[in-house]
Image (tube, grey):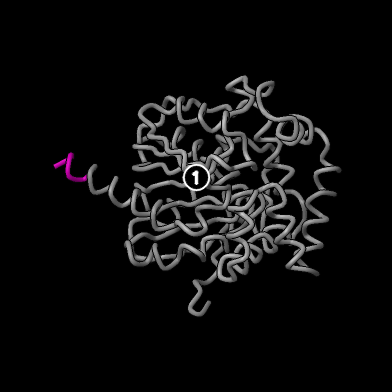
Amino acid sequence: MTGEPPDRKFRLPDGRMLAFRIWGDPDGHPLLFLHGTPGSRLEFAIGHGSGRDLGLALVVPDRWGYGLSDVPRTPSLPTFAADMATLMDHLGHHRFAVGGISGGGPYASAVGACLPERVDALALVSPVGPIADAGCAAAISTLHRFCFTVLPDLPRVTAGIFGAFRWSLERSPALAARLATFRGGRPDRDLILRPEICTRLLASFREGLRPGMRGPITDLAMFSRPWGVDLERIAAPARLWIGTADKAVPLLAARALAQRIGGCSYEEMNGEGHLWVAANYARVLEWVVATRRAETASAR
């Protein structure tokens, strides 16, 4: 894609590097959008045009351990929220919207809960839910229990799995596309066949895993234990979307997440898979814009 925004980097107070890009309209209302597992600041190239047309500045950082961003000594979701507050201060944004896709969902929820006075909308797309907090580990599928309760205690196995995926990204994009959707069913397999989606998703995965496996190892550690944030503190209007054919994250945990956020609207899209947003960024971004307009009108 021509005219891609440049990479930006800055140092957090403890010296860690945080990298990001601003997609969409750089002068628009800021939407801090957090990528999935794995992923990177490149993921939202797909939503660049919609963000520009809707007047949203999509601030997309590499989450911890992905791309060019460092991992703190003691990772936690409240610490991540503090990092995002620093990032948005750096950019001069006091108020902003927040979104999270898949593995970015817990991080986006934490930002909304820890910075309630600053977040004006929260969009959660096919998110990982609070599996430990909701006590639903016993009710999810065997594979999900392995991924979200066993694998986090096996960092070498996690590194091996994601290392094999990185190998496929570097040597066989066709194989990587199959691996990325091997459990996704027909909806995800159909989407990954679309060149404009496949190219950008694989580029995001490749860049995210380029420095190593710290990103997914850190993510799984976050997902497997209590989040350490009070979701009832989220004050912004919130909405959660998930497909009924999503096999990548536990649907039960996503429902629990929506129930724990006061007033969160919830939509299950019949027959849609985990990657549905790759063809529907405008739908999510339009909700953010409409929500902000409604909030602004009610404040007058």
Q: Secondary structure at mark 1?
A: strand
Q: Is residue 82 visible?
A: no
Q: Quadrant of residue 164?
A: bottom right
**Callout 1: few (<14), some (14-19), or many (20+) C-alpha neighbours within 10 Å?**
many
Could you tell me which residue is drawn at 65 percent across and 48 percent down? 184
Amino acid type at mark 1: Val
Between 269 and 65, the one lying in front of the other is 269
Residue extending farthest bottom: 2
Q: Give the extent of the magenta segment.
A: 296-300
Q: Is residue 234 magenta?
A: no
Residue 95 x, y percent position in the rendering: 34, 47
Residue at position x 48%, y 52% from top? 33
Q: Residue at x 50, y 53 (%)?
A: 277
Decide which of 198, 95 is in the foreground and name it: 198
Q: Is residue 298 magenta?
A: yes
Q: With respect to residue 115, does 35 lie above or below?
A: below
Residue at mark 1: 125
Report whether 293 appears left or right of 189. left
Relative to 121, residue 263 above or below: above
Q: In the figure, residue 248 lies in which quadrant?
A: top right
Main SS of residues in magenta: helix
The reply to whether residue 164 is in sight is yes
Numbered label tally: 1
Query: What is the x, y in percent for residue 222?
Result: 66, 35
